[in-house]
Amino acid sequence: MSAALLWIFLPGLAAVGLWFGRKRSGMVVFVATGLCLALAGLALVLPIGKALRLGRLLFELEPVMNIAGRRLVLAEADRPLLTFFYAIAGFWFAGTLSAGGHRQIVPYGLGMVALLVAAVAVEPFLFAALLIEMAVLLSIPMLITPGEARIGQGVLRYLIFQTLAMPFILLAGWALSGVEANPADATLVSLASIFLGLGFAFWLAIFPFYTWVPLLAGQAPPYAVGFLYLVLPTTALLLGLDFINAYGWLRNASQLYLILRLGGALMVVTAGVWSLFQRNLGRLFGYAMIVETGFSLLAVSLNSHLGGEIFTMIFLPRVIAMGLWALCSAALLKTGRSLDYESLERVAEELPTASAGLAAAVLTLGGLPLLAAFPIRIVLLQEVAGQSPLTAVWVLAGMVGLLFSAFRLLAVLTGGYFGPRRFQEGRLQSALIIAGAAALLIIGFAPRLFLPLLAGMLKAFTRLP
Amino acid sequence: MLPLLPPALLLLAALGILTLQRLRPSVGYAWVIGTLTSLAAAAVTVFLRWRLPQQTSLGNWLPFSVFIDSPILGLDGNSWPYYFSIGAVALAVLLTASARLEPAASPYAWAGVLSLCSMGMLAVLSANLLTLTLTWTLIDLLELVILQANSNNRTLGIQTVIMSTFRVTGTVLVLVAALVCRGQNLPPTFATLPPAAALLLLLAAGLRLGVLPLHLPDLGIIRRRGLGTTLRIVSAAAALVVLARLPAESVPAEVKGLLLGFTALAALYSAAMWAGAGDELGGRPYWLIALGGLAVASVIQGQPRSSLAWGMLLILPGSLLFLYSARRRQILFLPALAVVGLSGLPFTPGAGGWAGVFATPFNFWQVLLLAAHSLLFLGYLKFIFMPGEDLARMERWIQAMYPLGLAVPALALAFTGLLGWPGSLGPGIFWAGPLSLVAAGLLWTALSYWQRRTTRDDAVSRFYSSATQSVGGALARLFSLRWLYGLIWWLYRRLLQVIQVLTEILEGDGGVLWALVLLALLISLLRSRLAR
């Protein structure tokens, strides 16, 4: 049996099946969560490309699957990636009932994950552009609130920018095949670099192409937006790392790391400063995501083993904080409020758990010491300072901008009132939020116990330092 | 590991009290648990005076395969006085709490006191910048939780934000200092601080103390004597210990005058507000800023060791006075002992501080710092003679315990004066203490005369009175820095408008084209950079 059959086609087919049964939302969530967690578990224990004996049954998961002249390659080294993808999806789908999002999220989300895993696996790589575009198109129904007649500007802008990435990646594929045939052709190398750079800039919403991020976050349902912001940039980042791993001329270009450092710093600084002036929780979420992508780029720009470790470890706090943020935002929306600050004033009096969860998530993404993201951020900043102290100080300023906006949000949520409150939250929702906030705190206190869990993802990039 | 025992004991006691209050509420048991534990913790801190230095590292705390940095807790000659005094404050608060059982016995507040002191001890032990960042944040978060648990009104909103902003800014300055160290390939420890990092740490400590720039950490909602005092003292101790650990040449000569000027003005203004406050609790924030200012000034003038003396005066006589709720003539000698320590006379605990104030060369700001000390002394004297609750009417056991509690900071001050740090017992600058007392005496005489003069009902007196009020009001407005915060708020509003316009352009119909224009601009900038 092929690994692609298990981790791409099975979830893809399940997504189609669940779409037909989407009216039974409880069953859909249960099946999708179970399937994702099972696939994550299987990726954790099943070796790929090695014979495995189960009683009398002897079988092997083949790493390569040929389909219509293309190859889908899921090798042994990709197992941590698969675990990561499906664990995120399972984690996210488990909260959908509590978040109260519309019923399209689960089938479309599962389909997206299958397509994104295919994008990481496909060879030649230029087909990744098509698969990601399909995933983007599949995500559109999740972003439109049911019953909404008009499609928001954010969704359109998202679609435009993500679609613009596709031709650039396809052109980059053409140029790269030329470079492989004739590595000395400097023009082709330059063209490949420019096309790749622009393609990834659109995919990752790198400055100045990130305007759709806060726009979309301010308009679309937070739980769907959170899922989207998590899986799409993660896939693009992993693909980008795969490129650097695959092409020696790219890996050895010192200018690449300078551009990555500059791009990452610009994203953190501009989004951090912009976040200070936001008066909508959804938009603040968008800016926090831009800051996160900026930190990932900075980690890659280090071009060292430590940079790789930072790149992988950044994901765990991000996933938990974003999940918590999306869940708490959805809980606030369920009470009939909007995500504007005027509407959220003193909401902690009625929804203390959601408010506390939100505060924990925002403060984590702001890099507050003692919370989960801090141990990674401080080392990343120190390493950037080793290369360029001024850039590190600017990045810190951007991070502080987000942190101050977190304190401002805290003041809005509490309204300065810390007295007795009336609890109006469901038990499941409260339990999930408390678990998420506790996880952020525990990871912050004992980072060594948890953060290296994702370091295995580096195995897929054998040529990186 | 032994230095971790007192904070662990205090934290366990806090948890024990909280558990007890949940399962079987009992004020008596809670008080006994708190008092005995803080007594044991204080005893260990005394014992550790003869076991210095000690250091504990948390090893591989960070999750990376290569060792980069780790939290380090260290007890040395600079940190021990603060470590010990926090233990003494915990004990004093619990013992004197006996006199405050009637109006508001709150075991939850005692748990807060014990946990704050525990975190404060950890902060004092911080031996590198990473640990300092973590422990400062721990204290800030704990303060937030305590404020949360002790306030039933709606006055916190903007105050919480301003307080958090100042605190976080201080922590951020520590992070910048760590980046500066890394930029110069130096480990981020106190032993290897480059001048720029030392200056940043001085500013961070000054910010947390409310000195640089002058601002009041407005925790007015908690006017409790025990918990309110602990909140302020612990936070101040966590910042003061950094001052003592800074190198002598922390401040570049070019900015020395400017920083000293700001510090001296902040100290003088706060000392004047302290002396003029209605009671010691109203003046409490000013006490902290004024003495914190003297400690900061010592570092600016290249004498970080002298900051220890001012730090001890801030914590020990300060906590004694703030806990001095029930009064009786027979126990007046206890605050009087603190007055002797505060006087700065030769061979008293305050004497060591003068080297930081009157470091050569002489400058005008030193006169202001001396005046600040005189005003602090005057205010202290005024407050110990003010009426309070009558101790004689309280139960017998309280009459025994309460003076014991007051004796703890007084004895601790004497102990640190004798054995606190090398040079803590000495003449200091022998003429400075007497000069300050003479200045205080002259001030007292002048103020008394002025008061008599302005209370007469004639035209000249009314003129003097209104002139005094106008000048005082103007000075108060100037030094309160509300105008500065107003200016910052105005700037924020203008920036907000600019950001809104930019956002509308970038997210409007022409947003995609604008993004491409920005990209072209970025590429043109990058080309020149890459060409270099």
Image (cartoon, rainbow, N blue to C red):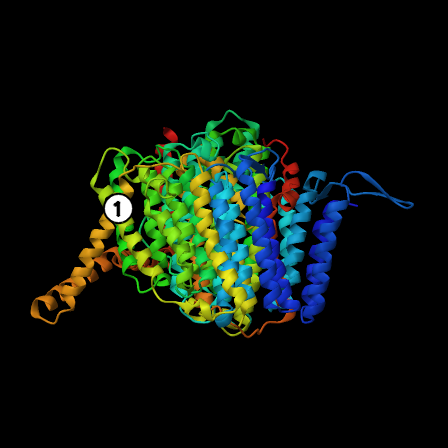
Q: Is residue B228 left or right of residue B252?
A: right
Coordinates of residue A172 in the picture (x, y in percent): 52, 39
Using the rendered view, name the quadrant where residue B506 is placed: bottom left
Can residue B71 be seen here? The reply is: no
Q: Number of labelled discs? A: 1
Relative placement, left or right, of B25 versus B372 is right
Chain on which label 1 sits: B
Q: Is residue B193 above or below residue A74?
A: above
Q: Which residue occupies the foreground of this view, B181 or A126?
A: B181
Of B212 and A164, nearer the camera is: B212
Q: Nearer the viewer, residue A62 or B452?
A: B452
Q: Position of residue B431 (x, y in %)?
A: 26, 39
Residue at 47% x, 54% y: name it. Answer: B407
Q: Residue furthest front?
A: B330
Residue at x-position 38% and y-position 39%: B523
Mark 1 neighbour class, 10 Å CA radius: few under 14, some 14 to 19, many 20 or more: many
Residue tagged 1 = B436
**Residue at x 51%, y 35% (from the top left corner):** A302
Quadrant, the C terminus of chain B: top left
Instruction: List the single residue furthest toward the right.
Output: A56
Image coords of residue B479 (percent x, y): 25, 55
Q: Is residue A389 visible?
A: yes
Which quarter shows the N terminus of chain B? Answer: top right
Q: Position of residue A463 (x, y in %)?
A: 61, 31
Label 1 element class: helix
